[in-house]
Image: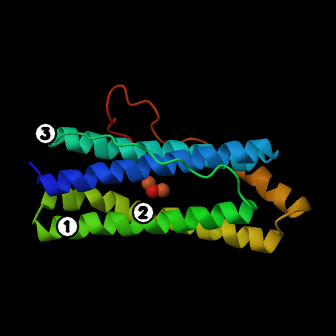
């Protein structure tokens, strides 16, 4: 059993994760439109990762006997100034998500809600990875260049990104889901 305040905070976080999924799907579509299929693949894998993040929280609320409250997802941007602009927006968004995850951890400590504190630690670790990936890609773009052969080299590398997370939630979250 978790508090109503915690239930509200996790429902808000589900919305943040769903917005992340929307944002990365929009970026994926944009990359496809401009012929960067490797970047499109990278963002579409990211979309699935965000859906897993949301669904783990959805399942956690159900496990706690709490009510899931899905809220309207705001519209993401659909055009971007450059590939670097996309990754700068991605990093900025992930930093926002990290703050929001930290707020949930703080609330769990305040409420002595050990179950949620433990649950949210997975996200604390995940956010380090998310920000690291974006920082690395921004660095690569800076080194290889944002146009011409350098950009196509990175595009080719990103096309190898494969989906490694669960994407079918009809049976809930399976035990092996990372
Ligand atoms: Fe679910 Fe990218 O944070």
Query: Total marks drawn?
Result: 3
Residue depicted at x 15% and y 43%: 64
- Which of pointers 3 and 1 lies earlier in the amino acid sequence? 3
Q: Which mark is residue 5?
A: none
Find disc 1 in the rendering and name its residue. Answer: 107
Front-most of residues 168 and 90: 90
Q: Which residue is mark 3?
A: 65
Would residue 133 be visible to someone looking at this image?
no
Q: Quadrant of residue 80?
A: bottom right
Q: Position of residue 81 (x, y in %)?
A: 75, 61
Cα gap from disc 3 to disc 1, whole angstroms? 19 Å
Q: Earlier in the sequence, mark 1 or mark 2?
A: 2
Circle 2 SS class? helix
Pinpoint residue 178: horizontal percent, then vertical percent.
Answer: 40, 47
SS under mark 1: helix
**Residue drawn at 74 percent across, 48 percent down:** 31
Looking at marks 2 and 3 on the same chain, the residue that comes earlier in the sequence is marked by: 3
- Residue at 90% across, 60% down: 149
19 relative position to 146: left or right? left
Spatial CA distance of label 1 from label 2 is 15 Å
- Alpha carbons under labels 2 and 3: distance apart: 25 Å
* Residue at 39 percent of width and 42 percent of height: 177
Q: Are marks 1 and 2 in contact (CB under 8 Å)?
A: no
Outermost residue, right side: 148
Q: Secondary structure at mark 3?
A: loop
């Amino acid at each position: 059993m978790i508090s109503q305040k915690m239930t509200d905070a996790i429902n808000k976080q589900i919305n943040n994760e769903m917005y992340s999924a929307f944002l990365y799907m929009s970026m994926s579509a944009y990359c496809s439109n401009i012929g960067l299929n490797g970047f499109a693949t990278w963002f579409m894998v990211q979309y699935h990762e965000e859906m897993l993040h949301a669904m783990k929280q959805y399942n956690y609320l159900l496990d706690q006997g709490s009510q899931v409250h899905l809220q309207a997802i705001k519209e993401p941007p659909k055009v971007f100034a450059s590939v670097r602009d996309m990754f700068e927006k991605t990093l900025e968004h992930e930093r926002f998500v990290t703050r929001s995850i930290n707020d949930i951890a703080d609330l769990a400590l305040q409420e002595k809600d050990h179950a949620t504190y433990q649950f949210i630690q997975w996200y604390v670790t995940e956010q380090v990875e998310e920000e690291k990936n974006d920082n690395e890609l921004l660095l690569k773009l800076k080194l290889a260049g944002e146009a011409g052969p350098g950009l196509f080299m990175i595009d080719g590398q990103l096309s190898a990104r494969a989906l490694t997370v669960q994407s079918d939630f009809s049976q809930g979250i399976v035990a092996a889901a990372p």
